[in-house]
Image (cartoon, coloured by chain):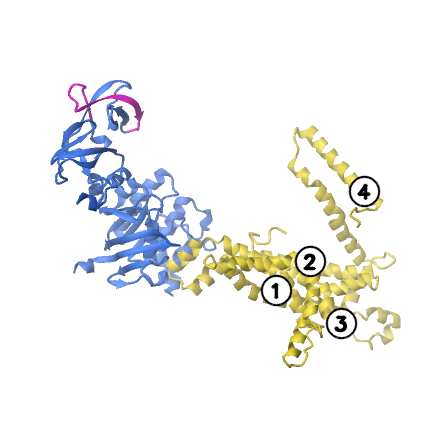
Amino acid sequence: MRYDVTLPWWAYTLMGVGGLCFVVLVILSIRRNHGIKRSLFASPYTLWMILFTVLPCILIGYYAFTDTDGNFTFANFRHFWDSNAEMKEIVGEEFASSIPRGTVNVDTLVYSLWMAFLCTAISLVLGYPAALFMADRDMKLGASLVILFVVPMWMNFLLRTIAWMSLLEDNGLINQLLVAVGLPRAQLMYNSPAVLLGMIYNYMPFMVFPIYTSLSKQDISLSEAAADLGCSSFQTLTRVTIPLSLPGVISGITMVFMPSVTTFFIPRVLGGGNTMMFGDLIESKFLTEGNWNGGSALSLLMMLLILISLSILRKADPNGEGSGRI
Amino acid sequence: MIEQEHLIELKHIRKEYDGVTVLDDINLYIRKKEFVTLLGPSGCGKTTTLRIIGGFETPTEGELYFEGREISALPPYKRRVNTVFQKYALFPHLNVFDNIAFGLKLKKMPRQEINQRVGQMLELVNLKGYEKRKVDALSGGQQQRVAIARSLVNEPEVLLLDEPLGALDLKLRKEMQLELKNMQQRLGITFLYVTHDQEEALTMSDTIVVMREGHILQIGDPKHIYDEPANAFVADFIGESNILRGTMVRDELVSFAGRGFPCVDFGFGNDTPVDVVIRPEDIMVVGEDIGQLVGTIQSVLFKGVHYEMMIDCGTFTFKVHSTTMQPQGSRVGLSIVPFNIHIMRPMDASPTEEA
């Protein structure tokens, strides 16, 4: 058994430099201010973020606007819009008009957004009542339901997705059951519904928990006050309970929508290549085609999309109670 | 005829939580336009009683009548009562105007009438110009006023108030006490008020209901409760008292603190153990030679209006309020007029033993 982790030399160097910087910074600040500045404690993490988040982002930006020789170009975005653009360049202007626009990239993006929207919407519709039930103080079952939601999350995300395979396969548990009761086998896997199912299964807890938290934080006397002022139990829900849980809902939407749009493992396992999502596209650009420039352009577009949707969400939740300041 | 006058009536109300009885055989009626206060220490069941009337709890046993109709199964939104909650329970997602208009909007009242009535209410609670404010941006006292306005705007038959002034500072509390009483008299609405503050109860109420451990100990107007407490607990809870064990020697003569005192009570029987209650302000400090009792002053505290002295008479240390100060350690005489000696049956003695 190997339990020691050997890192390459540059990793140790990195850690050493980082640690040294930290120590020097602390000493400097003690000298100057006669005390440690609280913000200094964030410096190792800040360094980490700069190295592994900010720098890669800059690199993505660089690759997205350059060609393989490092010259500035918009070609990568043209290729996103028209996947046949390259072919058109090769055949020349004369024949270009006879080649239709390759829509595969745009279609994949639209498909991804649509799937993510469905996943978020269904998670919300199914998850809100569940959260409501879990947060109900009179329901003793609520607490056990919380555990039911938590336990699957102790398992690895990939394992959980693969586990669905053994249920949905042609010879899977469900089909065996169907055959046992004399029904024909059904094609359950390698289609969009299977992917959607996998996504909802994996991401629904991220919808339920923020809503559950905001519901269980709600003062019970608020709904009593609503009833007192003339609300039926349904009106109490629509006029007080739901509006007050909106920060949780927004947080839930953010936490489901973002990973849904970028997901690439679930469609590969449960969609079996029939359902390409934007995450798969980016992954194949980088790993299969080795086209870093094209992949970077797609990544940049994705980031832009997420930023836009986040800013829209933040408009709906100006206090940032649910999602925090992102 | 008399039944009609009772707006709300509780008959043999009992409430159990998980096998623990928190209210036992509560019988109470509330008249129209009355200011009734449920008074008692925490855990006495006063809030539970209020919540049963408000519709947030259902009694385990017993009946609740509203204008002669049994309503204990009616949900809160169908009752013509409104509650002012302990922590106000204002809706944080709505501004002051929308909080107050909440009930009216549910009734689908025309916009213009809502504006007019909310405006009137804001004037009543001195919050004109605060319509657009967020409720979290208000002070405790202002939130309190919004909560009262939000309830009153619905013109309830009865307003239930659950320790509404508990979170306010002393000065504000005193002001609000007077304001609430004024409002109640001006609007002619029945108030049912819950508090553990005896002074608040004495200041505002027409009727005080003293409760303890799920039972009603005494119902009466403030003066009656103060002057004629039903037992030593009520006496102790309502104002300060000296409570002593004594013996009723015969009618109009009681013995305590080592000697006999003439009093005005009778009918207890001869040589019966009793509780004797004397208010600190009813004990006169006189010369050592003419007092009924003689004691040494142990401590003197200045309380603003009066001095509070602890006077040790050997068998008992009396708490005495007096406007003139006696030096600590000096020996003084104590004298009590017969009218100010309150005799009551001991609390722990059950009625069967007495009979």
Q: Distance between the residues labelled 1 and 3?
A: 25 Å
Q: Are marks 1 and 3 in contact (CB under 8 Å)?
A: no
Which segment did they paint magenta?
B284-304
**Colour of chain B in the rendered structure image:** blue
User: Which residue occupies 69% across, 64% down?
Assistant: A161
Q: Nearer the viewer, mark 1 or mark 3?
A: 1
Q: Name the residue under label 2.
A: A156
- Element on which disc 2 rests: loop
Does A60 sit above or below residue A12?
below
N-terminal-most mark, 3 or 4: 4
Badge 3 amino acid: Thr
- Element on which disc 3 rests: loop
The quarter of the displayed image where residue B158 is located:
bottom left
Q: Are marks 1 and 2 in contact (CB under 8 Å)?
A: no
Badge 1 amino acid: Thr
Q: Name the residue under label 1.
A: A120
Closest to the observer, B99 or A141: A141
Q: Is residue A219 magenta?
A: no
Does A141 sit above or below residue A192?
above
Chain depicted in yellow: A
Q: Name the residue under label 3.
A: A103
N-terminal-most mark, 4 or 1: 4
Q: Residue furthest left?
A: B251
Marks 4 and 2: same chain?
yes
Image quarter in which the C terminus of chain B is found: top left
Q: Which of marks 4 and 1 is in front?
A: 4
The quarter of the displayed image where residue A269 is located:
bottom right
Badge 4 amino acid: Tyr
* Tag shown at residue A12: 4
